[in-house]
Image (spheres, rainbow, N blue to C red):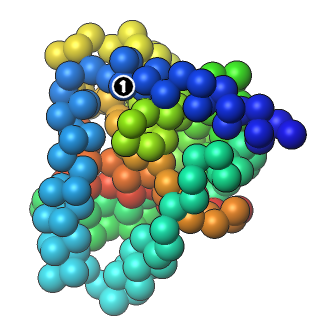
Amino acid sequence: MLRTAVCLALLASPLAAQDMLRSADQVRLDALDAAAGSALLTALAGGGRGDLDLLQEVMEGAPLAPIQTTLPGDWQCRMLKLGDEAALVVYAAFDCTITTDGDGFILTKTTGSQRLTGRITLAPEGMVLTATGHVAEVEPIAYADLADDFETDGTLWPIVGRVEQPAPDRARILMPLPALESEFDVLSLRR
C-alpha cells in the first residue's frame, strides 16, 4: 500500500526533478547515453576480468516501470567508476538507505569516505536522483541549495543520475559526467 501511495505521488508531479535540475546537471543528464557509451568502451578495453563481470551483472536487466519499484529500505551500495584515467574502478560495498518523503524518495549513503544524500523523483527521463556528494567529515548541503554554477570544491559536489530498478533486490543509478574522478559512475544497490 505504501509503495502504491509513493508511486502515485511520484506520478502526480512528473516535472518535480526537472524543475529542480541545475543547468549543468541537465546537460549531464541529457548526455547520459553518449557518456555511458564512451565510458563502457574504455572499461571494456582496460578493465579487469572480475570488475567487468561485476559491471555486466550490475547493468543486466531492463528497468521496472516506476510504479513497480520497491526502493525504500536498507541497501548495500557499491560505486563503479568508468572511463577517464582508470578504465574501471570498483569500490567495496557500503551502506545506503532509501526512505519515502511523500513526494519521492530520499537516498543516503551512510558509510565510506565519500557519501551522498539526495532525492529521487520522477521526470520525463524516468526516476532521477539529484544529490550532493560530500566527504565524510563535511556536513552536506541540500542539492537545491547549491549555486547553479557550483561544480566542486573537493569536499562537496553535485550528483545527478537516472535511477533504475531491474529487480526487487537490485537497483542502479547511472551518473553521467560526474564532477569527480571519472567519465561515468554507476551506483549499484543490492539487498
Extreme bottom residue here? 49
SS at badge 1? helix
| Apparent side of residue 177 relative to residue 159 in the rendered image (left or right) | left
Identified at 18% across, 66% down, the residue is 37
| Apparent side of residue 67 relative to residue 148 in the rendered image (left or right) | right
Of 189 and 67, the residue lying toward us: 67
Looking at the image, residue 75 lies above or below residue 158: below
The percent coordinates of residue 190 (x first, y second) are 63, 63
Looking at the image, residue 163 lies above or below residue 167: above
The percent coordinates of residue 88 (x first, y second) are 27, 70
Q: Crowding at label 1, few (<14), some or many (≥20) Cα neighbours within 10 Å?
A: some
> In the rendered view of the protein, which quadrant contains the C terminus?
bottom right
The percent coordinates of residue 154 (x first, y second) are 26, 31
Of 69 and 44, the residue lying toward us: 69
> In the rendered view of the protein, which quadrant contains the N terminus?
top right
* Type of the residue with mark 1: Gln
Identified at 47% across, 75% down, the residue is 60
Res 36 → quadrant? bottom left
Res 189 → quadrant? bottom right
The percent coordinates of residue 119 (x first, y second) are 53, 29
Q: Which residue is mark 1?
A: 18
Looking at the image, residue 43 lies above or below residue 13: below
Res 131 → quadrant? top left
Identified at 37% across, 53% down, the residue is 174
